Amino acid sequence: MVSTTYAVELLRRSLDLYTPSRSEAPLANMLKESCINDLGFEQAQIDSVGNVIATKGSGYPRILLCGHMDTVPNKVPVRMENGYLFGRGASDAKAPLIAMLLAASEFPKQNGTIIFAGVVDEEGNATGSKQLVKNNLEVDYAIFGEPSGIQNITISYKGRLAIKLICDVLESAHASAPWLAKNSIEESYDFWIAIKNEINKTDNKEKKTSSISCCLTEITGGSSHNVTPQKCKITMDIRIPTTNTCQQVLNSIDKIINDISAKKGIKTNYIIEDSTEPFEADNSSLLVRSLFLSILDVCKKRPVLLRKTGTGDMNIIGNAFKIPVVTYGPGDPHTSHSIDENINIQEYVTGIEVYKRALFHMSRLYNYKKNI
């Protein structure tokens, strides 16, 4: 049985390793070594993109426990203070990652197959999760480790479209005579306003999880301080609820861009930098029921089912494999990415127990259903 001291020390060791996206190798190596030498996994390997994947047990159900090893940039000094452990990734998402690993290590091998995956680049382009899909990982259920709060289960994430629009007005002029050429930065802004106005027609002020949202996140244009800009690039981040698809939203945006381009006589094109469909778990699935019962067992309170406005790796696995997927983990999501990112140590330890009980209930309910 894993001790609290070991659990806290393993988490602290993971926080001591600075692992911004695409620099996760030190943590992957540490986890692989722990799986083989300390935690009783039968196999552990690092795949072609840097994911660490460990397996234990055999037969059904086949359960994936997946968390990400990468963090956003910028270090947070690792320290313990007043019952909290501080460090970059403490909340998002090394506490859920290590809690899942330790829970999996105590799962009886005869009760099914556990696949633990520590994936790369979640904070970037989801390279790790996309590789799991590419490898056609065979699983029946999946839990993703993210800080939901100990009594909350995230059952839904919005989808995401990231679009880079390139506007080229074909000529430039001296800034002292701006009437001689169109201004690509100003023209790009007109495109953005038209797109934003169209998307805002869907806004549900009472329920943001049901609305399409959009945000202008990057703008690059101009070649010199005294020349009108010929080219401008803008990046739009659009979040899409489960009532829509990425293609539906893209069709609308495509029409706006083409209509304005034709009207203004401006050369434009766009690049889709990310397209992730929205996802919502089936509330009645064995997975949701098992985690619900686990939280009742451990916390003695009914959990809350959350629908979030962000986008997560569970969208990728859930939509690709068509299996029940939820996101759960200890930690306060509001400290994620902050200068004082932290995890309450007791909540982290409780999270390990919640994961353990959830695995117990999943095996029990799966076999009960199979035998009736």
Image: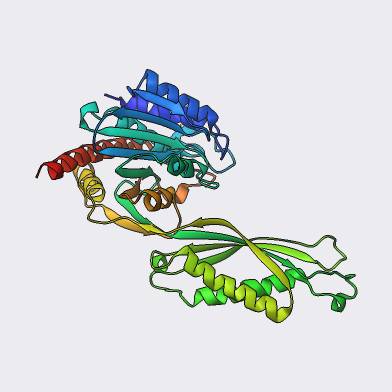
Count numbered badges in the picture: 0
In the picture, which quadrant includes the N terminus? top left
In the picture, which quadrant includes the C terminus? top left
Which quadrant of the structure image shows residue 156? bottom left
* Residue found 44% across the figure and 40% down from its top: 132
Residue 305 visible? The answer is: yes
Placement of 208 over or under 335, stated as above or below? below
User: Toward the viewer: 2 or 252?
Assistant: 252
Taking the image as shown, residue 154 lies to the left or right of residue 372, namely right
* Residue found 46% across the figure and 75% down from its top: 202
Which quadrant of the structure image shows residue 162? bottom right
- List x then y, in percent, for residue 193: 62, 74
Colouring method of the image: rainbow
Taking the view exactly as shown, the residue that stands out farthest to the top is 37
User: Toward the viewer: 342 or 333?
Assistant: 333
User: Toward the viewer: 159 or 88?
Assistant: 159
Placement of 7 over or under 75, stated as above or below? above
- List x then y, in percent, for residue 264: 72, 79
User: Toward the viewer: 131 or 77?
Assistant: 131
Taking the view exactly as shown, the residue that stands out farthest to the bottom is 263
- List x then y, in percent, for residue 339: 54, 45
* Residue found 59% across the figure and 41% down from its top: 74
